[in-house]
Amino acid sequence: MAKTGFNSLHRELATAIVAFQDAVARRAGMTAAERKCAGALAELGSATPKQLAESTGLSTGAITGIVDRLERAGFASREPNPDDRRSIIVRARDSTRLARLTAPAFDSLTAAMGELDARYAPRERALILQHLRDTIAVLREQTAKLGARES
């Protein structure tokens, strides 16, 4: 496949992932960024805004507004940070409701991806998985470079 074919497919993959995440978020009555933060918070249990920003790749400024909206929706709460009086801890709330809203879409995706995975021989899957790992590494590297330019 020509280099441009790879680039085009990577763009299509990125677009499809963003569209899926956005659709899941809309079903839960959130933006994609809010769902991303709510999901990260549900996994972490609690986090400082800085930790939440680091785990999602969003800015701390964006986190402030998102936490406000998640708090109003009942998915998060703020409390003073016992280790730093200038900071707060954001705690996950109602993770069961969040899972109820989002799990069906992810369960369906997991099943469909399992069917796709079964089409390939073990050696083919190994190569595909390595390409995906390498793609993720390149994306993280390029994201870090972009973040470094903002400083």
Image: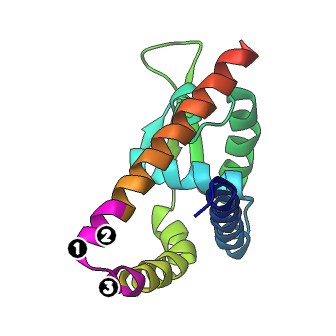
Magenta highlight: main SS: helix
In this orientation, which residue lies closer to the viewer: 6 or 138?
6
The three-letter code of the residue at mark 2 reads Arg
Residue 52 falls in image quadrant? top right
Q: Which residue is mark 1?
A: 122
Q: CA distance from mark 2 to mark 3?
A: 9 Å
- Reply above or below: 29 against 66: below
Q: Position of residue 134 (x, y in %)?
A: 43, 46
Mark 1 in CB contact with mark 2 (< 8 angstroms)? yes
The first of marks 2 and 3 along the sequence is 3
Q: Position of residue 51 (x, y in %)?
A: 51, 30
Q: Which residue is mark 2?
A: 125
In this orientation, which residue lies closer to the viewer: 103 or 132?
132
In this orientation, which residue lies closer to the viewer: 102 or 72?
102
Residue in view at x 49 percent, y 79 percent: 109
Q: Secondary structure at mark 1?
A: helix
Q: Secondary structure at mark 2?
A: helix
Can residue 90 be seen?
no
Badge 1: how crowded within 10 Å, few (<14), some, or many (20+)? few
Q: Which residue is mark 3?
A: 118
Residue 77 falls in image quadrant? top right
Can residue 42 be seen?
yes
In this orientation, which residue lies closer to the viewer: 138 or 84?
138
Magenta stretch: includes residue 121: yes
> Magenta span covers which residues?
115-127
Q: Position of residue 87 (x, y in %)?
A: 57, 19
- Number of labels in the image equals 3
- Reply above or below: 124 against 6: below
Q: CA distance from mark 3 to mark 1?
A: 9 Å
